Image (tube, grey):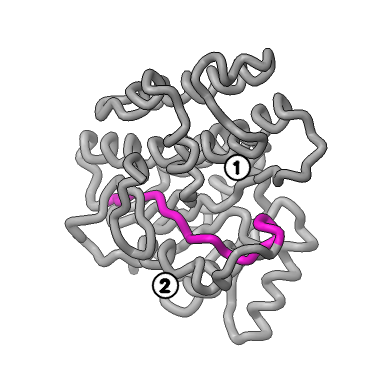
Amino acid sequence: MSLKRVAVVTGSNKGIGLAIVRGLCKDFQGDVVLTARDEGRGRAAVQVLEKEGFSPKFHLLDISDHQSIVKLRDFLKETYQGLDVLVNNAAILYNEDSTLPFPDQARETIKVNYYNNLDVCEVLFPLLRPHARVCNMSSLANAIAFKVLSPELRTKFLNPQITMPEVSSLMTQFVDAAQENKHEEQGFFLSRVSSYGISKIGLTLMSAIQQRDFDAQGAVDIVVNSCSPGYVNTDMTQGKGPLTVEEGAVTPLYLCLLPPDVSGPRGLFIREKAIYDWTTT
């Protein structure tokens, strides 16, 4: 008897995450787990989808809490003995009107968008089965931030053999420099909301490294990509995006549902279902 397949979407009680869950409920052959850090909002989102005729599961997940990630892993291991689709959608963004000081913005943004998502991967990746698909939700903010980095930093980020510890070191360098207001002096020529772009550079490179590592390990058709959903009308964008959440879900759903033994894309940044070079924009 074959084991039931399962997909997990982090931060999915609203916005693009909820739209991805809806799309997976339609087209993914298996259970779909909607996660949220607030149980009330998560279960309310499940009820919305149930009224539409879908049957998502719910599991509490706060990616900032390592034990919360471990509890999700244990649930998946016990219930499904594996994992087939993972969408790392949870993220934070401080808008221009935020009163939080820039050093705090930098620290919290890199913590959640890079380090906490990396923690999710490190805990859940051992569960990935052959033919699993991972979609790390990045943003074109990576290209905007990359464009205004110093040539020295761009060279470091562009190293084709860059390792995860090296990416983490660059993320930490940015946070540490921001604490002393030396980020521009060190080549991070950025606006107040730029920490989001830096975090998404980290997430994009993380995806490429993860694919490289899986290939080196001889993993059977495990595919990791990052993507931009586009400028979507959500709470995060304060309702400014021209795209609907359903339109924003198109590319991540494409990556989640790549067929078995697909030749590509693998370890790449995808925009509008096509490979996109975020380093030359």
> Callout 2: few (<14), some (14-19), or many (20+) C-alpha neighbours within 10 Å?
some
Left or right for 165, reference 40: left
Above or below, 95 against 238 in this view is above
Q: Residues within 10 Å of mark 1 (few under 14, many from 20)?
A: many
Q: Name the residue under label 2.
A: 28
Image point 70% across, 70% down: which residue? Answer: 45
What amino acid type should be assigned to the residue bearing mark 1? Ile
Q: What span is in magenta?
A: 222-238
Residue 151 drawn at (x, y percent): 37, 22
Q: Is 227 inside the magenta-drawn segment?
A: yes
Q: Is 131 colored magenta in this rendering?
A: no
Q: Examine the rendered structure and indicate whether residue 52 appears above or below residue 270.
A: below
Does the rendering let one see residue 119? no
3 or 219, which lies in front? 219
- The residue located at (58%, 81%) in the rendering is 54
Which residue sits at x=21%, y=34%? 216
Q: Which mark is residue 13?
A: none
Earlier residue among tags 1 and 2: 2
Mark 2 element type: loop
Q: In this view, does 231 lie above or below 276?
A: below
* Identity, as a three-letter code, of the amino acid under mark 2: Phe
Which image quarter holds the N terminus?
Answer: bottom left
Corner quadrant of residue 66? top right
Q: In this view, does 255 lie to the left or right of 265?
A: right
Q: Quadrant of residue 235?
A: bottom right
Q: Is residue 130 something one can see in this rendering?
A: yes
> What is the x, y in percent for residue 222?
29, 50
Compute the Cα span from label 1 to label 2: 23 Å
Relative depth, front residue between 207 and 75: 207
Majority secondary structure of magenta residues: loop
Q: Name the residue under label 1.
A: 69
